[in-house]
Amino acid sequence: MKNTLLIISSLFLFSLANSQFYKKHENDKMKFYGTLDLRNSIVFEENIGFYGVKLGVGNKRVRFGLGYHELSKSIFSFLTEDNPFSPVNFDEKYYSYRHVSVFFDPILYQNQRWELLFPIHVGLGPIKAFVYDSIGNERQVISRDFVPSFTVSLKANYRIFKWVGITGGIGDNFVFLDDSQFGKEFNTVFYSFGIKLFFDEFINFAKDKEYRKKYLFKYDFIDD
């Protein structure tokens, strides 16, 4: 049921993106595009963050390029005993997931303040998981070097100034691993929110002193 709803939603959003893609704009020239891409999700009942960066080119219709995302988390668990005088035991679970991806970001809607995107990522990278007990013994849970993934999401950006704003989004991550509990945990919904930096404006600031003076802290920049 979940996959069916995702496919229907993806087709609907893709149709919207397609209409935007073929819409004529005054300036369709491709320019450098770069952004931080941070995601948060629940894996093994723990809050885990994906930290990433995306670099490529784009215009007012679409952006595409390469991305890199990394998940690295250590979780400590204390093991309680009935005897209060027994030594304290614990184990540490370490999860690592790093992948390089090709991304394609159709732009569903865009004006000078708002931007609505439909990011699609196809990635590949290693997944590793280990458990360490209190005396240092290591148990390998899984170690795979080439695990493919597919990610779709919906993201909105709002500019406060021309160079900075806020961002938020929600999506789903599919990791093609196996049907084990570990594999299922990484097939998870994720969300993102935070500060958004528009790196293309930093290039304009670096090149043009007057542009920098005019727009660095100008809130009312619409229709300038």
Image (tube, grey):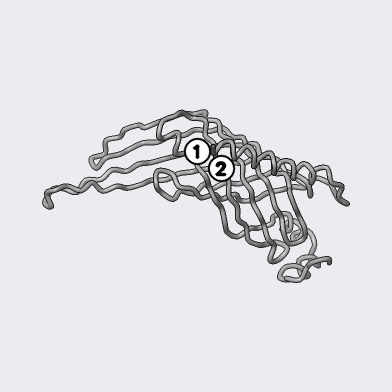
Horizontal side, residue 208 vs residue 177: left or right: right
- Give the answer, above or below, for where 26 lies relative to 1: below
Residue type at the position of mark 2:
Asp
Mark 2 Cα within 10 Å, few/some/many (few <14, many 20+)? some
Residue at image location 60% in from the left, 46% down from the top: 53
- The residue singled out by tag 2 in the image is 172
For the residues labelled 2 and 1, say whether their Cβ atoms are less than 8 Å apart: yes
What's the residue at 70%, 52% (across, down)? 116
Q: Is residue 23 rendered to the left or right of residue 190?
A: right
* Disc 2 to disc 1, C-alpha distance: 7 Å
* Quadrant housing residue 12: top right
Instruction: Looking at the image, tell me whether mark 2 or mark 1 is earlier in sequence order.
Output: 2
**Closer to the camera, 23 or 212?**
23
Viewer-nearest residue: 110 or 76: 110
The percent position of residue 19, horizontal first and vertical second, equals 80, 44
Q: Is residue 171 above or below residue 197?
A: above
**Percent of width and height locating residue 127:** 47, 34
Query: Image point 58% across, 41% down: which residue?
Result: 68
Viewport quadrant of the C terminus: bottom right
| Disc sitting over residue 187 in the figure | 1
Image-quadrant location for residue 93: top left
* Residue extending furthest toward the front: 1
Q: Amino acid at mark 1?
A: Asn
What is the number of the mark on residue 36?
none
